[in-house]
Image (spheres, helix red, strand yellow):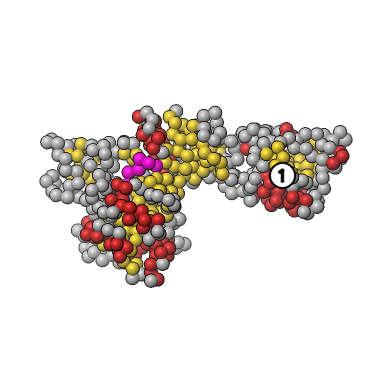
Amino acid sequence: MNELIDRFEPGRPGEDQMPGTGLDGGQKIRCDACPVMCYIAEGRSGACDRYGNSHGRIVRLDPLVILDHDNQQRQGEDARRVVAFAGPDTQDEDGESWDGDIVHAKRRFVSAIGAGTTYPDYKPAPFIVSQSIEGVDLVTVVTEAIFSYCGVKVKIDTDRHIGAETATVRARGEAVGHVTTAEYGSQMLSLGGVHHLTGGSKQEGRTTCETLLALCNREPVELSIDDGATVIVEAGQPPVIDGTRESRMRVGCGSATIGMFASQWKDLVDEVVIVDDHITGVVSEHQAGKVIGWQDTGIRIIGRRSTPGRYFGVSEPGLGWGGTTISNPLDILGPFNPKKGARPGLTLLMISTTGEQFAYFELDEALQPVEKPLPERLRKSVDLIEENCEPALCTVLFMGGAGGSLRAGVTESPVHLTHSVQGLETYVTAGGAPVYVWPGGGITLMVDVTRMPDNAFGSVPTPALVAPIEFTLTLQAYRKLGGHVDHVRPLDDVIARGGDYFNERRLSDAPSTSPWPLMEYLRRSGAGMR
Ligand code: SF4
């Protein structure tokens, strides 16, 4: 639930505070919030639809989002309640003017969503907000950032083979990224990056930017992989692979599954094979089976034996059992060897890593496996594998580098900010969500887009993504950093007067998954305890 705190009232031409000052002699004025430098006619918006010309002033058209973390304390009661604010010139429900007292502002956070940018970087960030929390004076520097160097890392929970490593990933036919190294139970994509955004054709750059924007704003996007699958990716939702919605993430690789469940199968069946494209497991040979006394069965797996009971390369990767190409599990078995324990009547369970596919066999007189209905005694163990699988989801992490230019909006000496972030003195958030900052040079961050407020991202036609970023630190540290201390404003002033881009301030419930950044900063830094 959202609430407008204050509505922009259109100004009059000739007023000062106009950030876009490039009057072209006619009715158009210039927006200088990004390198495109649009000239915008009265009543119209610029190329990105984020800024417009209202009565001769450049106005940020989306509201500045102020996050309300009080709702997280009210979980379980009236969690979506919104505290009413009124602007200084308006009246509240009781008909009284707001006197500027922020009685409910204890857990507010000014996010950078709708803040505007520092471009072209000679000016301080749009909002530098002070709040005193538990006796500590904190400053949050708030700005939208234009990221030409950015992309997303996509994790798709599935065993199914969606494409070879380094295969090109396309959106609407344009190359937007590639398949990268698979992780445990997941296929991974690396999309965007400066080469696709700016290094290819104009259309490639545009499509890449639109794809990243949609993924970051948690919209579904169809991606096709060269010589691979078509996948619909939506952050926080199951992937749809070649038209089939994935439901489960594997419980583990074939070897791990043997380790987890070997004792459950003991004395119920003579042999268990977990079919997996990466590591197929065989319980009678596996160390986990040996230590609890499984007997040899004379089984032979067609594949490369890595260590006892662990086989690689039983099949090509595909959309079948355990990410293989096979639909008949017997395809990975050679003849049973009677000299090593095979005998008529020997029982065999074959199952995939998600438990979605399984089959039960008994050897006939010729030691050929014959499929039989799954005995009731094995049902529980099959169900157990299914129950231990997590739901398959798509995860989208935005990754970008907060470069030198943006840092100038925070401090006159940009490298000091980098050192401060790397030294954990400055806490970085994106739309209020915690980020991971890569070690090493620069401020290269990653953030889970599902932890950010709705529609937190925008774009400009350069092409580049626009993402919110906030830096929180103590006022004392900000001074030391060479910060723009003359531009620090208390929270109530930001709420009451807004900023140079004249947009509304919108109070919005903070996502329940993101902690209140100011308290999180105090907790991490220990600043409140000094
Ligand atoms: S593209 Fe948008 S931000 Fe860039 S100059 Fe035009 S209106 Fe301003």
Q: Residue at x 62, y 37 (%)?
A: 323
Magenta extent: 143-150
Circle 1 packing at 10 Å, graded few (<14), some (14-19), many (20+), is few
Q: Quadrant of the C terminus?
A: bottom left
Decide if residue 40 is on the left or right side of residue 511.
left
Reply above or below: 36 against 443. Answer: above
Residue tagged 1:
307
Q: Residue at x 67, y 42 (%)?
A: 279
Task: Find out whether residue 30 is within the magenta segment.
Answer: no
The answer to which image quadrant residue 356 occupies is: top right
Main SS category, magenta section: strand
Residue 70 in the image, given as x and y percentages of width and height: 38, 62
Q: What is the x, y in percent for residue 427?
A: 38, 58
Asked if residue 387 can be seen in this view, the reply is yes
At 38% from the left and 67% from the top, the residue drawn is: 527
User: Residue 239 location, x and y as percent?
Assistant: 53, 40
Q: Residue visible at 22% across and 41% down?
A: 31
Q: Is residue 69 left or right of residue 323?
A: left
**Residue 258 sits above or below residue 176 on the image:** below
Residue 456 appears in view = no
Decide: is 393 above or below 88: above
Foreground residue among 491 and 298: 298
128 left or right of 208? Answer: left
Amino acid on which the number 1 mark rests in the picture: Thr
